[in-house]
Image (cartoon, rainbow, N blue to C red):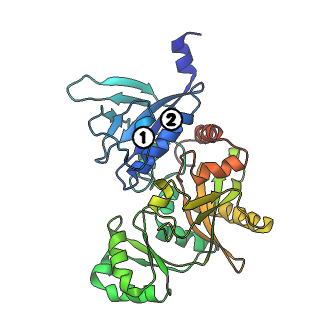
Amino acid sequence: MSAMDNAQSKIRVALLFGGRSSEHAVSCATAGGVLRAIDRRRYDVLPIGIAPDGRWVLLPDDPEPLELRRGHVPAVPESAPGVVVPTSTRERGLRVLDRGEMPQELGDVDVVFPLLHGPFGEDGTVQGMLELADIRYVGSGVLASAAGMDKHFMKVVFAGAALPVGPFTVITDAQWRHDPAAARDAVAGLGMPVFVKPARAGSSMGITKVTSMDDLDAAVENARQHDLKVVVEAGIVGREIECGVLEGHDGAPPRTSRVGEIVVRSGHGHDFYDFEAKYLDTDDSVELTCPADVPADIEARIQELAARAFLALGCEGLARVDCFYTEGGDVLINEINTMPGFTPYSMYPQMWLASGLTYPELIDELITLALERPVGLR
């Protein structure tokens, strides 16, 4: 077999990362992890970055510049050669369209792996664009991605499916501008502490733990830097336990991983699992444990709720479901992530590793699920 025939026999995967959201750097770091681990014997990889201004560009197949660490925040360069994405259902080819140059054909793509976090990527926008062109992609479709990104409507869906969620309230842009007193009253009814969050952001961006009503306005304004809609959640006293979910093959029920736990150690400047604790601190301020030390019946309960949450939202591919396990033995769903942190050391891959699925095998499984799934309405 010639080198050209061998290349053509591989599955062509476009890794899509970066994006316009505040989680741009986290997305780049995720792509770096996948680039290092993906099976090159089976896959031909095209790294496609989305610059902060929204421009799609072709990048070198090199994970090193994408690493997120103290002193280095990765970003997709706007100056790289631009990529044109097809909008017709009859073509799968990508083109490089650089300034002053003739268009260059990159060839057809079999599947897109959108490693995007946050708005304008994880929220159904990119998924809708790929649906228009009948291009297969990893992960949930438009509706599940949009609802999973919006903590307000996510909780509404879960409550409608009789899934247990904690007390919360929503502060819209209009309410905060025209009737902030009503918003403050609603928050006061939750009791203290509360967590003030942008409704459509992740990676703990813009989140503040509030222990006094005197600090509420500043916390809301901080969240509004990321999203004009704000969700305020009652503080739940309990352990944060997470569970990974994978779509079943051929319509089978979703599969769940062993559960994991995040413990934020006191004395390190973190009141909760914030951005620095997640991605930048290299000390022992945070401990990720998998499998978590919980009773077998509680693990089974969390796995059951995770699978139900996945189905309630209509998810596909993958998701991570975050729960609280209280001292009274209750389990509440905090949120679902349709594109969870996916570096080799993130909780989602770690939970599947504890369940017998390595990081390269997990990547392979997700691409396989995407290729099995039909395009269009399903």
Can residue 203 be seen here? The reply is: no
Tell us which disc is closer to us: 2 or 1: 1
Of 344 and 118, the residue lying toward us: 344
Q: Is residue 254 above or below residue 298?
A: above
**Residue 197 picture quarter:** bottom left
Q: Residue at x 59, y 10 (%)?
A: 1
Give the residue drawn at x 51%, y 65%: 273
User: Which residue is situated farthest in the left direction here?
Assistant: 100
Q: Nearer the viewer, residue 66 or 19?
A: 66
Which percent across, then down, holds residue 136?
52, 39
The type of residue carrying mark 1 is Leu
Q: Is residue 372 above or below residue 340?
A: above
Residue type at mark 2 is Leu
Q: Nearer the viewer, residue 24 or 54?
A: 24
SS under mark 1: helix
The residue that mark 2 highlights is 35
Q: Which residue is mark 1?
A: 66
Give the label on residue 209, or none.
Answer: none
- Determine contact: label 2, label 1, CB under 8 Å: yes
Q: Position of residue 180 (x, y in %)?
A: 32, 85
At a point 74% along the width and 66% down the height, the residue shown is: 294
Q: Nearer the viewer, residue 246 or 374?
A: 246
Residue 32 location, x and y as percent?
A: 47, 39
Q: Residue 342 in the image: x percent, y percent?
A: 54, 48
- Where residue 77 sits, quadrant-wise, is top left
